[in-house]
Amino acid sequence: MDSVIKLVVPLLLVFFSSLLFGDITGVESSKHQQEQQYSYGSTKLFAFGDSYVDTGNIKKQEAVAPWAFPYGNTYPGTPSGRFSDGRVSTDYLATKVLKIKTPIPYQWKDHAGHERLQYGMNFAVGGTGVFKTTSSNLNMTYQINLFEQVIGDVYSPSDLSSSLALVSVAGNDYLTYVAEHGGVDLGIFIFMKQVIHQTEVNLRRIHALGVKKVAIPLLQPLGCLPLFAKASSYQKCNDIINAFVIIHNNELKKVVANLNKETKQSTFMVIDYYNAFLTVFNNKGEKPGSQKFETPYKACCGGLCGSVDKNGQKNYTLCDDPMSSFFWDGLHPTQEGWKSVYSVLNLTALSN
Ligand SMILES: *[C@@H]1O[C@H](CO)[C@@H](O)[C@H](O)[C@H]1NC(C)=O
Ligand SMILES: *[C@@H]1O[C@H](CO)[C@@H](O)[C@H](O)[C@H]1NC(C)=O
Ligand SMILES: *[C@@H]1O[C@H](CO)[C@@H](O)[C@H](O)[C@H]1NC(C)=O
């Protein structure tokens, strides 16, 4: 298992990241701020973090995920820099919850017109953690620095009067810890404290820069990722990993509750990906908006998704119908997976 982890982790990290919604802790802040319309009058979404929210910030490199076939095959039909066959969480949060267009990736901001910039911007890059990871030297602090520069250059503080940040910390820090320590040891709990603390620092800073609401997804059940479910031939999740995730999530919820106490408002919200993912996995048809996935822990694109050898031979297998699969690759949901997760989350508090 260790050698498997060592082999797979660098790949995973690149792929990994994450975001949003489930149970929302706290009560929505009263929304009696004036609806001032500036040139950028729309609600804006600013995304930070990893591959669960990245919609195209990885530098384009043919033949490497997420810029290789079959990434993006369902939507937009060609690789778009998303770690999925199609849309990811950011797309659903923007279009279904906030009713705005998907914010432009930072990388393309100079090619976007004003019309597009009014929906906010996506700073997330696949592989990112709150700290440096095995796949990225650029931590989330770096993304927030870019955001700070953009305020002033592109947006004025008043443009943020209606804005939401989506802050995805989906597990790259932990995958890096495991890779660097050759497995899990007790030190991971000390590391967890550091991850939670740095997450708190990041949330505070994003809010201090003027973003009105800050949403942070709880960790998804990492033990159910195909990467880890593989050990049971995709029959079950790894309970030990999920137990670790629950501890992380409880700590994160405490931090968020404290932040809201400080601001005397429900500025910060957690989105319960943990339970939303489980609800979708266990759906037997009673959740109308969600697909019923027969083998939810198995990836549609198995092996080294997107990778071909020198002779053009695929190093992966592809399922017949990505719509019937919750996971796209070892770490990331399919479009249908994300869509189902969003259908079971109650995000009313975010759209107010
Ligand atoms: C993020 O990266 C920068 C540049 O390497 C570094 O100076 C900073 O200390 C890092 N922050 C964290 C929280 O790791
Ligand atoms: C891809 O598959 C070939 C065999 O088909 C194997 O030799 C090669 O190591 C694989 N590449 C990677 C990156 O695993
Ligand atoms: C969703 O959450 C809001 C509070 O944020 C609540 O008022 C509403 O009843 C919930 N809707 C459903 C369908 O549970």
Image (cartoon, rainbow, N blue to C red):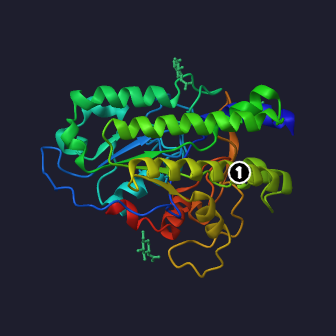
- Density class for disc 1 (Cα within 10 Å; few <14, some 14-19, many ≥20) is few
The quadrant the N terminus occupies is: top right
Horizontal and vertical percent position of residue 68: 54, 37
Q: Is residue 38 left or right of residue 277?
A: left
Whether disc 1's CB lies below 8 Å from ligand 1 is answered: no
In the figure, is residue 122 to the left or right of 345?
Answer: left
- Regarding residue 317, the answer to whether it shows in the image is yes
Ligand 3 shown in quarter: bottom left
Seen in the image, is 144 located left or right of residue 275? left
**Rendered view: 276 above or below 302:** below
Identify the image quadrant of the C terminus: bottom left
Give left or right: position of 91 versus 217: left
| Residue that mark 1 sits on | 247
Closest to the observer: 17 or 217? 217
Q: Amino acid at mark 1?
A: Ile
Q: Residue at x 70, y 70 (%)?
A: 294
Residue drawn at point x = 20 percent, y = 42 percent: 159
Q: Residue at x 23, y 47 (%)?
A: 161
Q: In the image, residue 209 lies at what x, y percent?
A: 33, 35
Q: Do we see residue 59 in this rendering?
A: no
Residue 308 sits in quarter: top right
Residue ID at (49%, 62%):
24
Which residue is the extreme one toward the bottom? 286
Number of marks present in the image shown:
1
Q: Position of residue 290 (x, y in %)?
A: 54, 72
Describe the element under mark 1 as helix, strand or loop.
Answer: helix
The answer to whether 86 is drawn above or below residue 120 in the figure is below
| Frontmost residue, 51 versus 267 | 267
Image location of residue 174, percent across then percent down = 69, 37
Camera-side residue of 219 and 82: 219
